Amino acid sequence: PWPAAAALAGAALAAVSWLPAAIAAYGPARAAVLFPADPGPREDLAYAAAAAGNLAAADAHWSAAQELAPYNAVHPWRRAQLAGKAGRWADAERLTARAIELEPGFLRARLLRAEALSRLGRASDARAETGAFRRALAERGTPPLHSGYEETVWGLDPAMK
């Protein structure tokens, strides 16, 4: 049998295990402090900043999330979207190239890269990227539908949701 002190300590830990999640529920800024290695709260902060029209803050939060999860293709793609909105097409092209490097089948990133290349006056590169998009679309088959990550990466038509 367990000693009473160990059983009591275990019961106390179990009783307060909900506390970090409850505190984090008050907002993503608090969650980012409580869970510094988790990119999720930074993603939430980025979405909120973008919705408020603060593109610089949104980019900073996406950048922080990207540092925590460097192999997540969504982070550079979201940063590329912000760069495009700000007219920074060279940054958008560089960031979408990184997203495509991480996820070659990331069709939305390919389209944004083609737009960036076109806006940079690189028409032949834009046509090549559009061709890569069309080939990937024809070859991809049915995308996985297991999480929002796959749904974003595979670039499903929003009308299909």
Image (cartoon, rainbow, N blue to C red):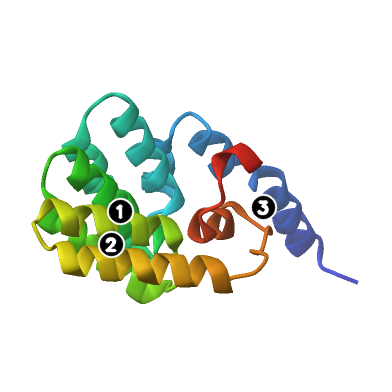
Residue 84: x and y in percent read: 20, 45
CB under 8 Å between discs 3 and 1: no
Question: What quarter of the picture does the C terminus occupy?
Answer: top right
Rendered residue at 42%/37% (across/down): 28
Total labels: the figure holds 3
Q: Amino acid at mark 2?
A: Thr
Query: Which numbered dot is residue 112?
Result: 1
Depth check: give the residue in front, 118 or 85: 118
Residue 30: x and y in percent read: 40, 37
Rate crowding at label 3 as few (under 14), some (14 to 19) or many (20 or more) other CA atoms within 10 Å.
few
Q: Is residue 114 positioned above or below 2 on the image?
A: above
For the residues marked 1 and 2, what is the alpha-carbon distance in whole angstroms? 7 Å
Residue 71 appears in the figure: no
Q: Which residue is mark 3?
A: 13
Q: Amino acid at mark 3?
A: Leu
Circle nearer the N terminus (3, 1): 3
Q: Amino acid at mark 1?
A: Leu
Task: Tell me: 18 left or right of 74.
Answer: right
User: Which element carries disc 1, helix, strand or loop?
Assistant: helix
Residue 78 appears in the figure: yes
Which of label 3 and label 1 is nearer to you? 1
Residue 157: x and y in percent read: 56, 46
Rendered residue at 14%/57% (across/down): 91
Rendered residue at 65%/42% (across/down): 160
Report which quarter residue 93 is drawn in. Answer: bottom left
Report which quarter residue 109 is drawn in. Answer: bottom left
Circle nearer the N terminus (1, 2): 2
